[in-house]
Image (tube, rainbow, N blue to C red):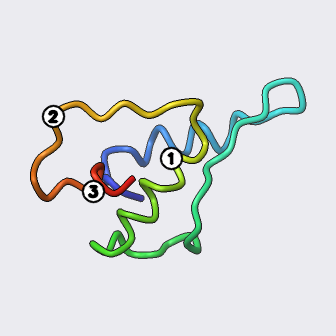
Amino acid sequence: MYPPKSRELADRISGAGTAESPEARLSQFPMGAAPLPQHFPLRNWLIAALTVGTVVVAPGERSGALIA
């Protein structure tokens, strides 16, 4: 889980899904995969692909948001 402070939220989401209110965590990596730097561009791509639109406001020069 990355960032680690999101663990409690992720656990709540995993336990809350029902037929009436489906909720899930999505990842192209297996559960427990390390948060390696090369994973972030792929994660950002997934986030951007699942949205209706993506707005990037003033990203840093090396921000992964620039390649999303």
Identify the residue at horizontal 48%, vertical 56% (top origin): 45
Indicate the amino acid at tag 1. Answer: Ile
Residues 2 and 12: in front is 2
- Label 3 SS: helix
Mark 1 or mark 3: name the one nearer the start of the chain. 1
Question: On the picture, is 52 further left or further right than 34?
Answer: right
Q: Which residue extends farthest right?
A: 19
Identify the residue at horizontal 57%, vertical 35% (top origin): 51
Identify the residue at horizontal 27%, vertical 51% (top origin): 66
> What is the x, y in percent for residue 25?
61, 49
Which mark identifies residue 58? 2
- Label 1 SS: helix
Q: Which residue is mark 3?
A: 64
Judge whether 53 appears above or below 59 on screen. Answer: above
What is the spatial separation of the Cα atoms under label 1 and label 2, in whole angstroms? Answer: 18 Å
Q: Which residue is mark 1?
A: 47
> What is the x, y in percent for residue 56?
30, 35
Residues 31 and 44: in front is 44
Find out whether the residues at labels 1 and 3 contact each other: C-beta distance under 8 Å. Answer: no
Q: Which residue extends farthest left?
A: 61
Question: On the picture, is 34 further left or further right than 47?
Answer: left
Indicate the amino acid at tag 2. Answer: Ala
> What is the x, y in percent for residue 8?
45, 41
- Label 2 SS: loop
Mark 2 or mark 3: name the one nearer the start of the chain. 2
What is the spatial separation of the Cα atoms under label 1 and label 3, in whole angstroms? Answer: 12 Å
> What is the x, y in percent for residue 20?
87, 24
Tell me where residue 24 sits by quadrant.
top right
Q: Which residue extends farthest top?
A: 20
Tell me where residue 37 sits by quadrant.
bottom left
Q: Residues within 10 Å of mark 1 (few under 14, many from 20)?
A: some
